[in-house]
Image (cartoon, grey):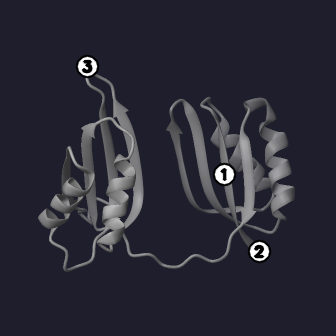
């Protein structure tokens, strides 16, 4: 059985998840990891699936089954991943919307040895649009939270940054 990456995106509408997972089920696929969300009115799917069906065959089946939904589907075999450190903190960045915020923040974190495990962004409407970025991050044990926030604040410039530990009991 191969580990396959399945991606799909299309205009958000009811039934997308049911249709995609129905095809996976018919092909004996086991959904092992997933992320699905609405991005700017489009529904985006990223899945890891253990499946005995060849990637091109599964992609064809998914494309045919979702044609009326207008999804763009891709399937590729992926090698084994590795165990990553779990997220230990939530880091938020808020500032006036402009290009480069995610790049500057992620570059600063990478240089500090911090791994981003999940990232979500939104532009909050208003008189002056605000860019909101929320990251779950794996912070090395010896890292000072306030120093990390200051590092990101300086690396991005003109933003508010907070770093909070994740309460394991909440997860």
Relative placement, left or right, of 37 versus 29 is left
Q: Eyeballing the image, is 66 above or below 154? A: above
> CA–CA distance between discs 3 and 2?
53 Å
The residue where tag 3 is placed is 127
**Regarding mark 2 in the picture, which secondary structure is present there?**
loop
Task: Choose the circle earlier in sequence order: 2 or 1.
Answer: 2
Disc 2 and disc 1 in contact, CB within 8 angstroms? no
The residue located at (78%, 62%) in the rendering is 28
- Kindly tell me whether residue 9 is visible in this rendering: yes
Relative placement, left or right, of 32 versus 3 is left
Disc 3 and disc 2 in contact, CB within 8 angstroms? no
The residue where tag 1 is placed is 7
The residue where tag 2 is placed is 1
Percent of width and height locating residue 155: 25, 57
| Crowd tier of the residue under label 1, counting other residues whose Cα lies within 10 Å: few below 14, some 14–19, many 20 or above | many
Task: Choose the circle earlier in sequence order: 3 or 2.
Answer: 2
> CA–CA distance between discs 1 and 3?
35 Å
- Residue lying furthest left in this view? 146
Q: In terms of depth relative to the viewer, which is nearer, 82 or 96?
A: 96
The residue located at (36%, 62%) in the rendering is 107
Task: Choose the circle earlier in sequence order: 1 or 3.
Answer: 1
Percent of width and height locating residue 11: 63, 30
Q: In terms of depth relative to the viewer, which is nearer, 46 or 161?
A: 161
The residue located at (32%, 35%) in the rendering is 97
Relative placement, left or right, of 26 versus 3 is right
Marks 3, 2: nearer the viewer: 3
Q: Eyeballing the image, is 133 above or below 16? A: below
């Amino acid at each position: 059985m191969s580990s396959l990456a399945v991606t799909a995106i299309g205009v958000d509408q009811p039934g997308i998840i049911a249709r995609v997972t129905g095809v996976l089920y018919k092909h004996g696929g086991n959904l092992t990891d997933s992320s699905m969300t609405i991005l700017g009115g489009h529904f985006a799917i990223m899945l890891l699936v253990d499946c005995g069906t060849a990637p091109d065959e599964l992609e064809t089946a998914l494309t045919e089954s979702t044609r009326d939904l207008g999804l763009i589907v891709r399937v590729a075999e992926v090698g084994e991943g590795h165990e990553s450190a779990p997220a230990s903190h939530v880091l938020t960045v808020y500032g006036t919307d402009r290009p480069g915020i995610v790049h500057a923040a992620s570059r600063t974190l990478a240089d500090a040895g911090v791994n981003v495990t999940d990232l979500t962004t939104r532009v909050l409407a208003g008189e002056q649009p605000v860019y909101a970025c929320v990251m779950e991050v794996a912070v090395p044990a010896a890292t000072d939270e306030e120093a990390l926030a200051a590092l990101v604040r300086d690396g991005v410039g003109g933003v508010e940054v907070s770093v909070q530990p994740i309460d394991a009991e909440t997860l």
